[in-house]
Amino acid sequence: MTLTKGILGINARNLLYIRPFNSKKAIRMADSKLKTKHFLSARGIPVPKLYGVIRNRDELQNFDFNSLPEAFVIKPNLGYGGEGIIPVVGREGSDFLTVSDDRIPIRQIRDHISDIIDGRYSITGSSDIAFFEQMLFCDDRISRFSYGGLPDIRVVVHNLIPVMAMLRLPTEQSKGRANLHQGAIAVGIDIAKGVTTYVVHSNKIIEGPKGLKGFEIPYWDEILLISSKVQLLTNLGYLAADIAIDKNNGPVLLEMNARAGLGVQIANLAPLRKRLERIRGVKVNTPEKGVRIAQDMFGNKIEKDIQHISGKAVIGDKEMVDVIMKDGIFKALASINPVVKRSVIDTDFARSIGLINEGEVIDKVKLKFSMSDVRVQTVALVEDLPGRQYKLVIGKRDLSDFLIDPARKYKDSTKKISVSAKSDSTPLDSGSGINYSVIDNELADIDRQARLVYHLNPLNLESEKAAFLRDKKYNPQFVYPDLKFDPFRLRERLKSIVCDDSPLGMIFKAKKDEILRKLSLVEHIGTDAFSYKSVELFGRPDEAIILSAKEYLEGKPAKFANEKLDIGYEKAVGVFESVLKKYGLNDWKVKVSESMVSDCMAGKENILFVRKGAMFSEQRLNMLIVHEIETHVLTAENGNLQPYKIFGRGLAGYLETQEGLAVRNQSILCDKDMEKNYWPALSVLAVNEAFNMSFRGVFDFVCSMGFSVDRAFRVAVKVKRGLEDTAIKGAFTKDYLYFKGFKAVKEFESTGGDVKDLYIGKFNLKDLDVVKGIPNLVKAKYLPEWMNG
């Protein structure tokens, strides 16, 4: 077997693809399996569950092995080539049983983990971390070809385009590992169809197990899409994604490799370099497009040959066709059915495109359509098609110029309708013809899905708090929820939104840009870039605001007013409900939440959240009523009465003014000696210090300012959440805006501004003049009782 022309060698791979496209930072992340796991899991990429981590010998000494399930895998964080991995499938007494039927005593397991910590299996040679993760069990359709172990699929991706793939099957020689250098079998895969081609063992083509050649890989399109998404998320321009198919969970990413090996060329009997050169300069915006390009460029050679020889177009069992009318072309999904003699068009569809008139009843029409660049003119039957998924059925009479391949996927070439498109049923809001009511609804829906606060709440807050208070050298290691949205699709939706330069257009464009920054921030939770993304969205304290905060804190009392925390969260719920009822806000509900950093928070879906276990003094409860209900809730309700939803959810930059107004209100009505009055100024300094301190450093700093241990911990959480390892420098900067906004509102008021104007809706003070110029805006209906008096 010889392959020379177009083969990608190690030197060429390093010089042409790894150095130019893989930054050192991205490679370091790829090398760390734990960082990869946390980062990608939070962004919707399926990965094995994490059971435990051992970072040093103290943790090894104290680790409870009985806390692990029966089956698990031990891995080195910086391991490579499958070295250092022990898959455990069960136990006998105190011993562990491996997938290769070896019996390992607990002492030997501890020694192995000690070796991992010493860096024996580390790709960098430095000390390492051992971790335990979920044991995956191979899909039965693939496991029948494998000797024990876990087969995987390696997909090489460049420029978001999967260029080549292979199936790796463990053998007895490889001791159950999917490692080609240790004797595993490599099987080439047709990128387009996910069907296996050549079988190679030790660089020789073999026949392989019966049924292996021509085997269709399950979940193939999903596997390609995961691989492309991984590249987009990690910024590795050239990588290999290793994916296993679990019998219960489907495709699961095992790891990604920034220095992808070159054995995939042998498995496919195809040169990798030639394929990589073919996609040079191709513009790809989304993983979905990358997958389509891959399947078109690298998988349909046979199909093209058939078309060339036969002169007939190859189609699948469903196709998108162009129905040709005098006034335009209408796209429709068609079922390809050679059993039916004549083609059929759905009655409602025919009527909607003007092929038949309203109220007209006929049984057949003349029809022109184009499919796979072949024009067809026919007479079609007019019928009500069941289910309405298909608008057309193409019958045998009209299929003489086509060959049908049932495995072929149809290509949906329909274009998305832009939200800026003109609508006959909805009034236009600007002279340019842009429908801002549609844009308003679109932005509200996207913003609703982003859920910044939800994604920033550490899942393990209580356990990490206990560890922090127990060990004075410990910094919390936070775990965050998985993403509850698809960032790719939301970003594409946002990019399709077009606004003009009118005042209204500028408001919506600013909000669109803010949501894009918010999505980016959420995507970077747990990464080194998180602090930078936070500054992009919220900014960071400058010297002037830091100085102002210090001056404000100089006025705090030597001892804060004594607060008797004797009101439990359940009683507080009743108090909040009665206040909401007093204002006639019957649509608002009060709910108890276990996963909150704050004691109380007004959400955007008419829900006021109260933290389970929170305790309040009467003064603090009153301050929360002023802050959350008589500021945030009332402003949201007034915003909901305006012509656009954005006034209820918030214009770009609204947070600064909203929180500033809330702080202003509570400072007027509540005891100035209370600790809570000084929290906003404290947050400015804490955010600033967090850029130079660990979690522990921020905690100690707040304690040194005379605040309670509980407050110090909460402040440290607020400014360090978003980081996975809080020992590193960096900050979530949002909370400094409370004091900044407070200063701005006070300045506005001192220069003759009417605070009631700030209750119209949620916006930034700097936009007040623009907001007042919006047509059909109404005055604030809901104002605090004490403000009306």
Image: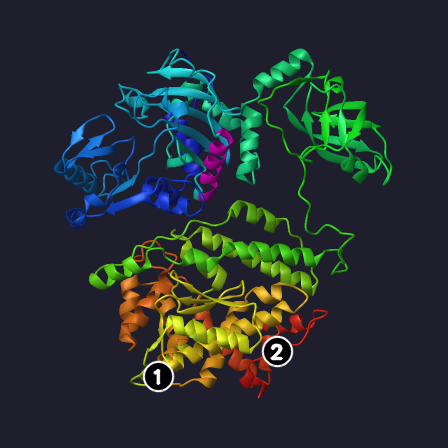
Which of the labelled discs sits on residue 556, or is there none?
Answer: 1
Tag 1: residue type?
Lys
370 or 134: nearer the eye?
134
Residue 630 x %, y %: 52, 77
**Overall secondary structure of the magenta section:** helix
Q: Quadrant of residue 136?
A: top left
As measured in the structure, the alpha-carbon distance from the residue carrying label 1 to the one carrying label 2 is 31 Å
Q: How many numbered dots are placed on residues in this image?
A: 2
> What residue lies at 56% left-to-right and 70% top-to-bottom?
586
Q: Which residue occupies the extreme left position in the image?
A: 107
Judging by the rendered image, the residue that carries numbered circle 2 is 757
Say above or below: 729 vs 278: below
Residue 533 x %, y %: 45, 56
> What residue lies at 61% left-to-right and 78% top-to-bottom?
757
Q: Is residue 355 left or right of residue 198?
A: right
Q: Which contiguous range is marked in magenta?
A: 220-233
3 or 491: nearer the eye?
491
- Residue 763 seen: no
Is label 1 or label 2 in front? 2
